Image (spheres, rainbow, N blue to C red):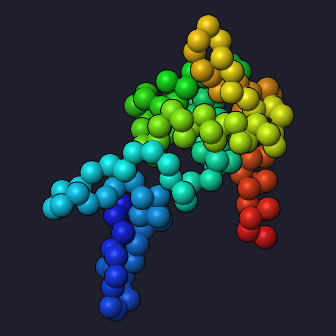
Amino acid sequence: MYLSQGNVTSLNEDNLDSPFAELNLLGRVGTNLAFNIGQKPNLPPEILVAVCLDYAGMVSPNTQTIALNRLLYEVGSPGMAFKITASVLCDAIIQVSRQQKNVDLADSASILQLSFKGKVEKLRDELILSYYSSNHG
């Protein structure tokens, strides 16, 4: 489910790759499986930041910031789910902030934070809509 099936000779239900396989979360190291930590080429910055906004809205409602450490390392966080690094998340936020003025990477007392203005649900939905309308139709 999380690992690509590789080359297959016949197409059937058992050898279809899951959408999770496209994220390249797991890889083979010899005969073992290991997490692929870092950049996910099939995870666009807009979608990653939208997921972070969604998470922030769930765990810290009524706030306008969330520490990157929470987004990366808390149980159930986007960082844990997608196995990304701090640099990957920072790059995504910076890239999105160039297009979306209400999202920014802030440094408060040497703590990096995702900062946002407005309703988190609205910002999340705008990012998703913007990405899919410009890239898929």
Which residue occupies 49% across, 24% down? Answer: 69
Q: Which residue appears farthest toward the top when viewing the image?
A: 109
47 up-or-down from 70: above or below: below
The picture places residue 121, in percent across and down from the top left corner, at 72, 37
The picture places residue 106, in percent across and down from the top left corner, at 69, 21
Left or right of 94, for residue 43: left
The picture places residue 26, in percent across and down from the top left corner, at 34, 55
The picture places residue 65, in percent across and down from the top left corner, at 66, 21
Which residue occupies 73% across, 68% down? Answer: 136
Judge whether residue 3 can be spotted in this image.
Answer: yes
On the rendered image, what quadrant is the N terminus found in?
Answer: bottom left
108 up-or-down from 126: above or below: above
Kindly indicate the quadrant of the structure image that contains residue 112. top right
Q: Which residue appears farthest toward the left when viewing the image?
A: 31
Kindly indicate the quadrant of the structure image that contains residue 7. bottom left
Which residue occupies 79% across, 53% down? Answer: 130
Which residue occupies 62% across, 53% down? Answer: 44
72 up-or-down from 18: above or below: above
**30 or 46, which is in the foreground?**
30
**59 or 44, which is in the foreground?**
44
Judge whether residue 61 can be spotted in this image.
Answer: no
On the rendered image, what quadrant is the C terminus found in?
Answer: bottom right
Q: Which residue appears farthest toward the bottom when viewing the image?
A: 10
